[in-house]
Image (spheres, rainbow, N blue to C red):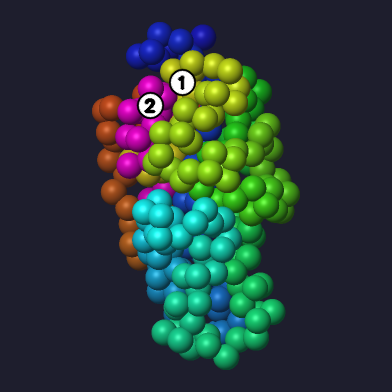
Amino acid sequence: MDTTPFGLPPQILAFDVFGTVVDWHSGIAREVQALRPAVDGAAFALAWRSGYQPAMRRVMSGELGWTLIDDLHRLILDGLAARFGLQDLTEAEMRQLNTAWHRLDPWPDVVEGLARLKARHVVCTLSNGNIGLLANMAKRARLPWDCILSAEVFRAYKPDPATYLGVARVFGVDPGRVMLVAAHQDDLAAARACGLQTAYVERPAEFGAANPKDVSPCPANTRHAGDFLALADQLGC
């Protein structure tokens, strides 16, 4: 049996999705370049993603009412269109581009790693992405979730404690039996503050090969793994 600093193994593995499970940078770059080959896809992907946190803060501050990530993505996209020469796209093309987030590819280790982890644990999403987006992504990428949990369920975005504690509440377990798996140290720190176990997974190319991430271990995390297969090894799956 796996042992942890909490004394008990996790029952629920809750996964951050964008960057941790799927490669958003390559997917977004690919989709915009399919519409406009002359666009710098890498720069566009980074710019679109950089609007994510500011857009969520507008909701959290009360400036905007509760808004699905699909709709926030569209607000950001509308603001970027002229900068990247996309202002003449049709409405149908804009809608298609906006749903690029539904069609992101998983990292190479993900499908096999999730299948192994699922054999001994409940595996679910814990993403700010909305349910429709996550379901479409899972269907296309064959992600074997037991359950899709989203900010939409809790009407709160991470890092609001309602999201992390919500996972424990949904499954009727103590927060200490939930492990958040993520490639983002700030997400993991917020989960730890709520009593969850945490596993950091290295995704050095999240922002593209030209912008490698620092994936140094943080000793506060329960686990640190190179990928989902390595995490499965550590958890005895």
Q: Quadrant of residue 70?
A: bottom right
Q: Looking at numbered disc 1 in the image, what kind of residue is underneath it?
A: Pro
Element class at badge 2: loop
Quadrant (top left, top right, bottom left, bottom right) of the C terminus: top right
- Picture layout, residue 88 above or below residue 117: below
Q: Residues within 10 Å of mark 2 (few under 14, many from 20)?
A: some
Q: Residues within 10 Å of mark 1 (few under 14, many from 20)?
A: many
Residue 39 in view of the camera:
no
Q: Name the residue rendered at 64%, 39% in the picture.
A: 148
- Judging depth in this view, the residue of 56 and 186 nearest the camera is 56
Q: Residue furthest right?
A: 139
Range shown magenta: 186-204
Quote the CA–CA distance across marks 2 and 1.
Answer: 7 Å
Disc 1: which residue: 175
- Measured as percent of width and height from the top left, residue 149 is found at 60, 38
Element carrying mark 1 = helix
Total of numbered circles in the picture? 2
* CB contact under 8 Å: marks 2 and 1: yes
Look at mark 2 in the image and give the residue it sits on: 194
